[in-house]
Image (cartoon, helix red, strand yellow):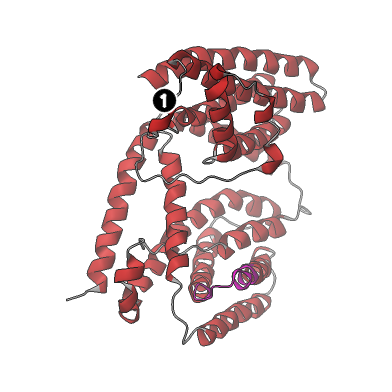
Amino acid sequence: MFSPEALWKERFGRFIKETGSYLRYIFNGHLVIVLLFLIGSAAFYYQEWIESLQPGFPAAWIMALILGAMLAHTPIQTFLTEADKIFLLPLETRLSIYFRKSIVFSIALQSYLLLMLLAVLMPMHVKVHGAGFKSFFWLLAVLVLVKSVNAAIRWKVLHYIERSMKVADVLIRFFINTVLLYFLFAGTRPVFAVVPAAILLLHFVYFKKQTEYKGLKWEQLIEDEERRMNSFYRIANLFTDVPKLKDRTKRRAWLDWMPKLLHYRQDAAFSHLYARTFLRSGDYFGLLVRLTIIGGAALYFFTFGPGQLLIALLFLYLTGFQLLPLWNHHQNKLWITLYPVPEEARWKSFNMLLLAILFFQSLVFALIITLKGEWLMAAGILAAGTVFSWFFVNIYSKGKLKS
């Protein structure tokens, strides 16, 4: 006999087992040590910045905007698979318990993230508004309660297929959440917070009534679930092979000029292949952009000279290390073995691309330091970045990929 409780327990257990096996590889990697160092450095400078804040600083608005966005972003993890739209669709009316458990799990998982974010923002609240750290617990309770209402609304909105409806819902909830949290953090009378709270509840009642006779959009739920898991698989793939990782290809027409700079020769076949793969497949190009922006921002705000040099090298390492899977991106494609090109040419093409990427990032970091007027430090970062890039590409990556 079909049991929704047993089904959810089986799906949840499989999710925990699978993610746990990959998390073991992730947290055993030396990349975590680098990230811990970055977090520690950021915490040091953040504490110094907190000490410099004045009573007129708009801490309430900043906290309300950040936490309001996190409350509005409320994905529901359903553990659905492609086959479910065939085998579970006829049982939709009997799956209320299953989906209720999924909503509760999603709220619990995101409440943990809220706890960490509130812990980061709390020193700002204490410094500017003179609040006590004891208020942390009741603020967290309010955040979890508001997150639960947001999750309930989000689940109702998932009954719509129109993207415009979903976007409008997120924007409305973000605005309501932000106003509600501002009244809480600014220390206004509780009656002011009651108004946006009541509007949020009315928002839920409206969608509950509108979706009373609407069915679930199974294709969309399954696609959302696959997208979330694929994001996790992409991270895990940096540490071990992930067979379930689904590659996504996206043409970026505005970057078509880059591959055209390469020569059309037989020994440049892999140069074209890896260049187009970097620009279009997976998240390689986006990873470079994100790490360059984050690293550049860190370099701009950090003032300690040797620390700037170390930060630049750390971000070069993070970029290079996370681009190494590009080498094996086509490992399951038989046709590349038919290229009349020696293996050495493939190594050369990959190394040249990786070296060009790391040198480009070093140049960007040096230019950012130049904007601060620190010419000597900029030259040092460019020189150290160039040497590190050569060492990483010609020694470290070869040993890592051949091991």
Residue 294 seen: yes
What x and y, as percent, mark residue 383?
Answer: 68, 13
**What residue do we see at 43% from left, 33% from top?**
330
User: Was residue 302 drawn as part of the magenta stretch in this picture?
Assistant: no
Q: Which residue is mark 1?
A: 338
**What residue do we see at 38% from left, 32% from top?**
334
Extreme residue toward the left, this view: 1
Residue range highlighted in magenta: 157-170
What x and y, as percent, mark residue 136?
Answer: 54, 58
Report the amino acid beneath label 1: Leu
What x and y, as percent, mark residue 10?
Answer: 24, 61
Q: Is residue 312 above or below residue 57?
A: above
Q: Is residue 301 above or below residue 204?
A: above
**What residue do we see at 41% from left, 20% from top?**
400
Quarter of the image for residue 293 reads top right
Residue 212 vs residue 378, the one in the foreground: 212
Q: Is residue 339 found left or right of 135 in the rendered image? A: left
